[in-house]
Amino acid sequence: MSKLSIYGMTYEQLTDWLIDHGQRRFRADQVWDWLYKKRVTTFDEMKNVNKETIELLDEHFVLQTLEEEIKQESSDGTIKYLFKLADGNVIETVLMRFNYGLSVCVTTQVGCNIGCTFCASGLLKKSRDLSGGEIVEQIMGVQKHLDEKGEGERVSHIVVMGIGEPFDNFDNLMSFINVVNDDRGLNIGARHITVSTSGLAHKIYDWADAGMQVNLAISIHAPNNELRSRIMKINKAFPIEKLMAAVDYYLEKANRRITYEYIMLKDVNDHKTEAKQLARLLKDKRHLSYVNLIPYNSVDEHNQYQRSDTATIQEFHETLKANGINSGVRWENGADIDAACGQLRSKQIKKKNAG
C-alpha cells in the first residue's frame, strides 16, 4: 500500500492516529509544529521527536508527493508552478502578490468536468480528485520556496480557484481548509480564504450548513439561463433559479457577502442589457453582493471568444453601480506568462503527447 501525504490529516486526526498507534498526545503538538512552523522536509529533522515516533511516521506517511516541474515568473511578481503528482499527473498553482499580502491559488482536481466553453481548465477532463494532502502540499510547496529566499515572506491569503470544481471535491476541500486555517500551524485566517464554485447549488446548501467563515465566490458569468447555459453547461443541471435559491439559503444562514465572478466576453455577455439583467438578479441581495468583472484571457482552443475592450468593461461596471450593485474590475496577474488558469498544464501535456 502506498504511503499517504501527512498533510492530509487535520490536527485532530493526527492526534487520534498517534494515540491509536501507542504514542502520547503531546507528540501531535511536536509533529504539527515541525510540519507547519518549522516546515521540515524529512521526518528525521524533527529533533525533539523520539525515534519510535519518527519511524512510525516514516512507515506510514510521506512529506512530499508533489514535484516542481516548471516555475514561470512574471514581471509583476506572479509565479505559476506546474507540480507533478506521484501518479504522474500535473497541476497548476499560482502565487500572486498584492498590496495586502501574498495569495496562492490552489487546484482541487486533475482536470475539470464543468465544461465552461471559455476556460482552459476544462480542456482536459477530470481524471480524479486531489486528496486533502495534495491540496495542502501546494501551499507548503509555495511557502517553502518563499522560505528558501530568506526574506521572511509568508502566504497570507488563499483562493481555491484553480483547476477543477472545489465543491465537486467537498470532503477533501473541507479537510484542506481545516489544516491551513489551524492557528497552531499555518494560521491562515478563514476570512483570508476564498472558495469559488461554478454553481453546484446542492453543495452551496452543504457549505452554508458547515458554518464556515471562509469567503464564497460564485462564477455567474451570465444573468439569464439561455446565455449561461450556452457558455456554462453546469447551468443545465443547476439553472439560475436553483442557484439563487441556494444563495438565499446561504445568505440567511451565514449573512456573509458573496462575490460573483463575471468574465467579460466581447459581444457575448458584455452588453448594457446583461448588466441591467445582472443588477435585477441581485437587486434583493445587493447589500451582500459584489460583482468581480474579469477581463478574459484568451485561450487558443476557445478562439471564438475575445476580451471585451476597456470602455465596454467600464460601461458595464458603471451600469451595475448606477443600479446599486457594488462591483470592480479584476485585472489579471501574470499577463506575460500563461495567464489563463489551466493554460500551462494544457500546453505541457500537449507537448508530451506530441513527443
Image (spheres, rainbow, N blue to C red):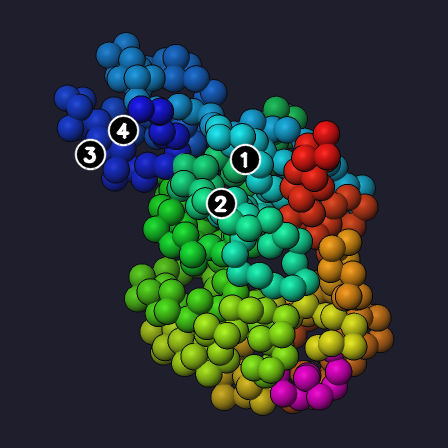
Residue at 59 percent of width and 69 percent of height: 232
Q: Distance between the residues labelled 4 and 3?
A: 9 Å
Hey, what amino acid is under mark 4? Ala
For the residues bearing labels 4 and 2, Cβ distance under 8 angstroms:
no
> For residue 242, which quarter of the picture?
bottom left
Which residue was labeled with disc 4? 28
Q: Position of residue 17 (x, y in %)?
A: 22, 31
Q: Position of residue 67 (x, y in %)?
A: 56, 27
Foreground mark, 4 or 2, reads: 2
Hey, what amino acid is under mark 1? Asn
For the residues bearing labels 2 and 1, Cβ distance under 8 angstroms:
yes
Q: How far apart are marks 2 and 3 (CA)?
A: 32 Å
Label 4: element kind: helix
Q: Which of marks 4 and 2 is nearer the N terminus?
A: 4
Q: Where is residue 301 in the image (x, y as percent from the top left)?
A: 74, 55
For the residues bearing labels 2 and 3, Cβ distance under 8 angstroms:
no
Q: Nearer the viewer, residue 186 or 247?
A: 247
Q: How far apart are marks 4 and 2 (CA)?
A: 34 Å
Hey, what amino acid is under mark 2? Ser
Q: Label 4: how many residues lie within 10 Å, few (<14), some (14-19) or many (20+)? A: many
Magenta-drawn stretch contains 333: no
Horizontally, residue 155 falls left or right of residue 41, namely right
Which residue was labeled with disc 1? 89
Which label is found at residue 16?
Answer: 3
Report the predominant secondary structure element of the magenta stretch.
helix
Q: The N terminus appears in which quarter of the rendering? A: top left
Q: In this view of the protein, can residue 28 be seen by the observer?
A: yes
Horizontally, residue 28 falls left or right of residue 23, namely right
- Magenta segment boundaries in residue numbering: 270-278
Which residue was labeled with disc 2? 127
Q: The C terminus appears in which quarter of the rendering? A: top right
Q: How far apart are marks 2 and 1 (CA)?
A: 9 Å
